[in-house]
Amino acid sequence: MTSETQPTCNCDSKPSWIKDRIRPDEISRYMDGGADFIPDAEIHEKLKRNAVTDPGRIRAILDKSLAIETLSPDETAALLWVNDPELLGLMRQRALEVKKKVYDNRIVTFAPLYMGNRCVNNCLYCGFRRDNKDAIRRVLSTDEIRQETQILAGKIGHKRLIAVYGEHPETGVDYMVNSIRTIYSVREKVRVGWGNIRRVNVNAAPMPVDELKLLKDVGIGTYQVFQETYHKEAYAKAHPAGTLKGDYRWRLYSMHRALEAGIDDVGIGALFGLYDWRFEVMGLQYHALELEKRFNVGPHTVSFPRLEPASNAPMADKTGYEVSDDELKHIITVIRLSIPHAGMILTARENPDLRRDAIRLGLTQTDASTQIGIGAYSSADPDLQEKEKQQFILGDTRSLDEVIRELATMGYITSFCTAGYRCGRTGECIMDLLKSGAEGKFCKLNAVLTFREWLDDFASDATRAAGEPLIERELQDTRNKITPAAFDKLMEYYRRTAAGERDLYF
């Protein structure tokens, strides 16, 4: 096993790579009259105009949300100002209703796999920033990627990963394609069946269309790029000029290029704490509306990480825009109501109590057994993350087994289903299914089958004891919602899965 390490990041070793990254024509062709789709003044005006809460109007907006239609910016702005306890309670109740209508009681789990911490950028809130001289820089070799995947798929039991790449020539598109192929190639014998990663999502820097087509060809799932902050002035303060990430619009149109390249599912997000949280929610809303308008498909997922302390990151502690727990819960509630078809991700940045509350507000995806040190899953060094000055501080270090056990006791089934990406239920197709509620029926069947797999292959005795009655309830619930013929087919697949077959799906 080999991996290259060095104490600092030699980011100027390939200046031509940096110079050629941003392609102006892959920004301008999406713009209208030279303007982008985030109108700062208009957003501020809508927030000001809707600051006075009318209870009757709020109730009407909540009724509309059950139609699983993206709300208008004015409607979203109105929800952002609600502070009456009764109305807040109604909003949270409706958010969970919307989530169950679209996604039923399923929760998807995944793990992040950090491929390297070399970066040409100098973001003032990030431990990977170029000027953090304390960071030990590493990029995983192919052998190390394989070993990390063997742990994640063969020991822990994950079926989905988010591969996380810094913006650096050593982790460019050729490295990304090779690493994704390596992940998909791993197949580990486990207790009954086998462990393998069936879906690799990607969290990476903005990329040009030709490179995004290569990611499409290698079989990625969702392509994530978070805008960090939608406010242009705040963006400029956090991302120094002259760096690749300093170009606001190159980042803003990442999802446009991905969809043009044929990637079906895209994920957006904001780093809450860099600017006013209400403005950021509006930015996410405008982003969703823009994608629906131009491509007839909104974001597959929305993420809302909060700013966390990080090594040698001067903006990571105090910005003046810190977001409280109650404000984050309000953010989650409004996003669920405003962009109802989107999956919603809250990661291990947050503590277990907050993540538990978020599930009751409509969360659909969360990570577990999370490590963010480079090579940390297969390392025997428990202090690796601190030694390498990780990107941020984790708030939840529970194992996947513990998280699944808690979800089961809460009445939520953990779904490891990736069938939609092999059956064409992606992009515009899945949006139509989500809006109609039909996707939840497909996924409920596959959730039962994959949960059976995981219980047999990986669950501890305690988690299996919590999961068995849940799966029996799920089977009974499914019997009541589908045709007898479909239920018979489900039970055939279920018996075959219990006997050791794997990856059966509808």
Image (spheres, rainbow, N blue to C red):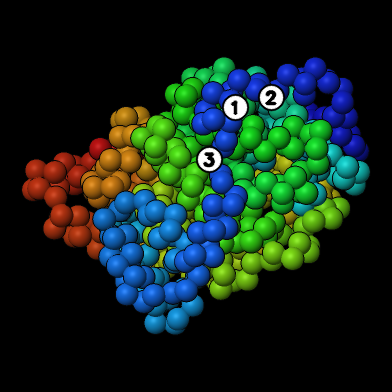
Q: Is residue 169 above or below residue 343?
A: above
Q: Where is residue 279 in the image (x, y as percent from the top left)?
A: 58, 57
Of pointers 2 and 3, the one earlier in the residue sequence: 2
Residue 86 in the figure: left or right of residue 304: left
Of pointers 1 and 2, the one earlier in the residue sequence: 2
Location of mark 3 (residue): 37
Q: Position of residue 14 (x, y in %)?
A: 83, 20
The numbered dot on residue 22 is 2
Disc 2 is placed on an element classified as loop
Regarding residue 340, the answer to whether it shows in the image is yes
Q: What residue type is labelled 1?
A: Ile
Residue occupying image coordinates x 65% and y 50%: 231
Camera-near label (1 vs 2) is 1
Regarding residue 139, the answer to whether it shows in the image is no
Disc 1 is placed on an element classified as helix
Label 3 packing within 10 angstroms: few (<14), some (14-19), many (20+)? some
Label 2 packing within 10 angstroms: few (<14), some (14-19), many (20+)? some
- Foreground residue among 434 and 253: 253
Residue 239 in the figure: left or right of residue 193: right
Q: How far apart are marks 2 and 3 (CA)?
A: 19 Å
Of pointers 3 and 1, the one earlier in the residue sequence: 1
Which quarter of the rendering shows the N terminus?
Answer: top right
Do tag 2 and tag 3 residues touch (Cβ < 8 Å)? no
Location of mark 1 (residue): 27
